[in-house]
Image: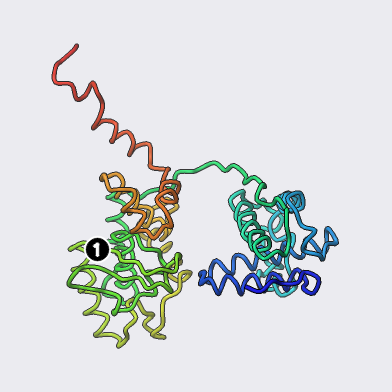
Amino acid sequence: MPRISKKLKSIDDIIVNYLEYCNYKNLSLKTIKSYHQTLMLFSKYLEEEKQITDISKINKNIVEEYISFTKERGKYAFVSSEKGAIKANIEKRSDIGKEVSDSTLNNYLRNIKAFATYLEDNNISKNTKIHECKFIRTERRAKEQLTDAEFNQLVKALDCSQFHQFRDLTVINLIFDTGMRLSETLHLTTNDIDLLRRTILIPADLTKGRKDRVVFYSPQMAKLLQRWLRFKDTMIETEILFPTQRTNTFLSNPNFERNFRGYLKKAGIKKYVTPHGLRNQFARRFLLNNGSLVVLSKILGHSSSKVTEQAYLDIMDEDLRKKYQAYSPLANMDKDIY
């Protein structure tokens, strides 16, 4: 890649070059948007708060000051542009100035570190020591899980005589049975489904890792999927697996998430569970049934089993208690010692 002259390029110009490089690397649109948001905010901070317009002047201390500045100022107290303020609907927000979560701050730092790697690899800026910045230690909170009874309660709350509810029921069960991400599931076509082998090919342009991935589903799911396909084909002609009925387009994540919250409420379930939580449920149950961490990592599409291990450390205490009972030394002794 040709070197970029830092004398001729503004910080914003270099950020644009970096985003083009990310696109060249075939990173997901979601990742590129995250980089763009973080780096444009950082650029404005450098210009307005530190009067820095030379990329070579950024270093570990300045990045740490920026993270502290963001934490102190709170949410939406600093925006990259007037256009950004309008898009965020700043005037009507009730959470302006509220605390920015540590996980969000860590994500900002992670994005800036990735940008620093690009700067060093292209000789744009050297010896910044930005990679020495420490992430904020966060407390892991166990994700709320649906019991078997609650899951059955949820799916029974949907009316399969209605197109959108039958569609959403199939999506819920499919994520629960395969561990796919919501965005991957909603953008499938009928061509991605192999009904004979009970497999789904998730195309590279849908996956977070930008690589084709195969997942599998159960005989029970196969029956539901075939029912849905027959029903869908009588109502609408499309290769989209889970279309909107009115516009015959892909269903968006926010629309499904809104529907999902309604189904939880209708089912009387007060736990905070999201569609992504169904993927977590799949992983948790896979591990508790003695599934291999390495195999799970491949099914979920993680870059390594280490990522999977870190993501699913929060198996519930009740799950651990049940696992303990099966292996308790005293409980499994043949003789009665008392």
Along the viewing direction, whichever of 229 and 162 lies nearer the viewer: 229
Picture quarter with the N terminus: bottom right
Q: Is residue 308 above or below residue 93?
A: above
Q: Quadrant of the C terminus?
A: top left
Q: Position of residue 332 (x, y in %)?
A: 19, 25
Query: Which residue shows up at 27% across the image and 50% down it?
Result: 149
> Relative to residue 303, is residue 200 drawn left or right?
left
Of residues 229 and 52, which is closer to you in this image?
52
Q: Amino acid at mark 1?
A: Tyr
Dividing the picture into quadrants, the one containing residue 124 is bottom right
Give the side of residue 287 with respect to residue 271, left or right. Answer: left
Whole-percent x, y for residue 277 in the image: 40, 55
Residue to which mark 1 is pinned: 217
Colouring method of the image: rainbow
Q: Outermost residue, top direction?
A: 338
User: x and y percent of residue 336 in the render?
Assistant: 15, 15
From what the image shows, is residue 192 above or below residue 42? below
Residue visible at 25% across and 84% down in the picture: 233
Q: Residues within 10 Å of mark 1 (few under 14, many from 20)?
A: many
Count of labels in the image: 1
Instruction: Pick out the residue farthest to the bottom.
Output: 237
Between 52 and 96, the one nearer to me in the picture: 52
Q: Quadrant of residue 197?
A: bottom left
Q: How far across and down, in percent of the image, does residue 285 sit?
A: 30, 49
